[in-house]
């Protein structure tokens, strides 16, 4: 489909160029879809050494954007009657969430998905985190982790509050949710993801590689400072690594186009039945013991965000080594932005200009594309 960007005070392409110039990002790519067509734009490079430009078909690690996929799988299983959102963790994983102040009889599947379980994020465990910082990352980049191993790391810290009392973003929640999906179906989470989401939507560039270290197909290099606290940290190529440490909480590889298709189906009520759709978009506040993204509320695997321009968008975002991803749209899915930066030192602020150009009230009536 041929598309021509609409004139605007700041166009999406202007915003991409500014993101590279201002934040020093290696490269950024974005796709915008609305009722009039599709627009793809990019700035910077997929490979800074060769000068290869960003391409629409590139596959990249989407980080915690994975959580929207995981929640969709669980909700589709609920629609099939295989499990219920009010089921307790103990029902499906007896004895796993117990001791140290934890009680799986009081934690529901819904509380896992909306991050109100109180269970600590295993990724913030100091000993575990230290293995992925700086030079230590090179020694551990091919380490494989079983989901239960990482859950136990999260449970080694007592819960920060009683289930349902507050919000605490935690990857451990999504590991537990995926383990429940496996127990309820007798199949791996990757198999259920493929059966319920990937194949029905035709997401040819989307996969959960698990311990497979290489990204199959065309992809940008993933440039990382390896979470170094040094202001002048060296930048490394972190493309190849075992990402079983993120699994159902942040381990999916996808493309801009596949993310467009998935979130269009999710927001537009084409993927989930009506009851499960309502559950997904019932939100809780994100104020809690650990600050989260300002202006947000969290549903089941998705969040709403009030932008400075006054528009509210829905979707998810994610970060991992060498990659930041944003996938958000209007509540009905009529206008969608998917964007990825193949560097990890800029933070979410790298997307601010693009969000404003696509969803801001002054962006040519909010219309980012023609086709």
Image: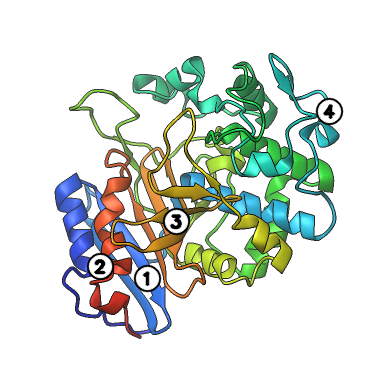
Q: Are marks 2 and 1 in contact (CB under 8 Å)?
A: yes
Residue under circle 3? 59
SS at mark 3? loop
C-alpha distance separating marks 2 and 3: 21 Å
The residue located at (84%, 28%) in the rendering is: 94
Q: Residue at x 32, y 79 (%)?
A: 369
Residue 243 as seen in the image, left or right of residue 311 = right
The reply to whether dot 3 and dot 4 touch (C-beta < 8 Å) is: no
Provide the secondary structure element on which disc 1 rests: strand
Question: Residue 193: x, y in percent?
Answer: 67, 54
Task: Indicate the quadrant where residue 365 lies.
Answer: bottom left
Q: Nearer the viewer, mark 3 or mark 4?
A: 4
Please, what secondary structure does the residue beneath circle 2 have? Answer: helix
Q: Is residue 6 visible?
A: yes
Q: As drawn, is 299 to the left or to the right of 41?
A: right
Residue on which disc 2 sits: 12
Q: In the drawing, what numbered circle is on residue 32?
A: 1
Front one among 331 and 139: 331
How many residues crowd mark 1 within 10 Å: few (<14), some (14–19), many (20+)?
A: many
Q: Nearer the viewer, mark 2 or mark 3?
A: 2
């Amino acid at each position: 489909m041929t598309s021509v960007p609409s004139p605007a005070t700041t166009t999406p392409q202007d915003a991409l160029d500014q993101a590279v110039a201002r934040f020093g990002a290696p490269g950024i790519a974005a796709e915008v879809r609305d009722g009039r067509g599709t627009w793809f734009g990019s700035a910077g490079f997929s490979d800074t050494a060769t000068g290869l430009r960003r391409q629409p078909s590139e596959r990249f690690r989407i980080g915690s954007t994975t959580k929207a996929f995981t929640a969709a799988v669980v909700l589709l299983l609920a629609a099939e009657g295989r499990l219920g959102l009010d089921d307790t963790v103990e029902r499906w994983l007896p004895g796993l969430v117990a001791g140290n102040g934890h009680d799986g009889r009081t934690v529901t599947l819904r509380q896992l998905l909306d991050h109100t379980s109180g269970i600590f994020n295993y990724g913030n465990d100091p000993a575990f985190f230290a293995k992925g910082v700086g030079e230590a990352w090179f020694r551990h980049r091919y380490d494989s982790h079983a989901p239960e191993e990482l859950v136990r790391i999260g449970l080694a810290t007592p819960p920060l509050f009683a289930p349902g009392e507050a919000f605490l973003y935690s990857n451990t929640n999504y590991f537990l949710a995926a383990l429940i999906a496996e127990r309820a179906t007798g199949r791996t989470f990757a198999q259920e993801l493929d059966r319920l989401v990937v194949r029905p939507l035709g997401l040819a560039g989307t996969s959960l590689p698990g311990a497979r270290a290489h990204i199959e197909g065309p992809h940008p290099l993933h440039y990382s400072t390896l979470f170094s606290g040094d202001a002048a940290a060296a930048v490394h190529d972190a493309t190849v690594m075992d990402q079983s440490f993120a699994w159902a909480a942040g381990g999916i590889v996808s493309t801009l186009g596949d993310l467009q298709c998935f979130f269009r189906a999710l927001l537009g009520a084409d993927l989930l039945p009506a009851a499960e759709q309502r559950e997904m978009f019932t939100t809780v506040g994100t104020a809690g013991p650990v600050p989260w993204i300002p202006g947000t509320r969290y549903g089941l695997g998705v969040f709403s965000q009030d932008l400075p321009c006054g528009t509210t968008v829905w979707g998810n975002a994610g970060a991992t080594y060498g990659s930041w991803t944003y996938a958000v749209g209007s509540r009905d899915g009529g206008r969608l932005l998917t964007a990825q930066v193949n560097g990890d030192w800029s933070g979410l602020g790298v997307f601010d200009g693009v969000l404003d150009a696509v969803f801001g009230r002054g962006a040519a009536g909010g219309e980012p594309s023609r086709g």
